[in-house]
Image (cartoon, helix red, strand yellow):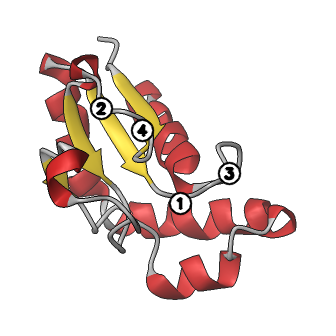
Amino acid sequence: MKLQIHIKRIYEPYDSADGYRILIDRLWPRGIAKAEAHLDEWNKEVAPSTALRKAFNHQADRFEEFKVAYKKELDAHQDDVIRIMHIAEDKPVTLLYGAKDPKINHAIVLLAYIKDLQRS
């Protein structure tokens, strides 16, 4: 079964096609009112730990090291990841993140982690 899981910056406009919207950051994104976020869930458990987030600091040269460490953290929260996968069996799921860079952020790593779990 192909899961419908997408990632999107929370600063992008809400779209009803997003389906079930999950914020996957530990910190609430600046400048976003809770009403305009249109969240179904705020899941801090699948977000990187504060220590890991600060060590990474969205530096491109630290991204590979960050991915390895974050995947280890996700291993410890696999129940939360699997629950997201179960939601995506029935409807689209959009994982929302606040990071500025669309190429180096934890949402990319989480989506890849989910795809790897699905294949295994």
Question: What type is the residue that disc 1 sits on?
Answer: Lys
Question: What type is the residue that disc 4 sits on?
Answer: Ile
Q: Are marks 3 and 4 in contact (CB under 8 Å)?
A: no
Mark 2 lies on residue: 14
Look at the picture and state if 15 lies above or below 32: above
Where is residue 89 shown, x and y percent of the image?
18, 21
Question: What type is the residue that disc 3 sits on?
Answer: Asp
Comes first in the chain, label 2 or label 1: 2
Viewport quadrant of the C terminus: top left
Where is residue 111 shown, x and y percent of the image?
48, 39
Mark 1 lies on residue: 71
Q: Nearer the viewer, mark 3 or mark 4?
A: 3
Q: CA gap, disc 3 to disc 2?
A: 19 Å
> Residue 114: which disc?
4
Q: Nearer the viewer, mark 3 or mark 2?
A: 2
**SS of the residue under disc 2:** loop
Where is residue 12 shown, x and y percent of the image?
44, 37
Mark 3 lies on residue: 101
Q: CA gap, disc 2 to disc 1?
A: 28 Å
Q: Are marks 4 and 2 in contact (CB under 8 Å)?
A: no
Q: How many labels were placed on the picture?
A: 4
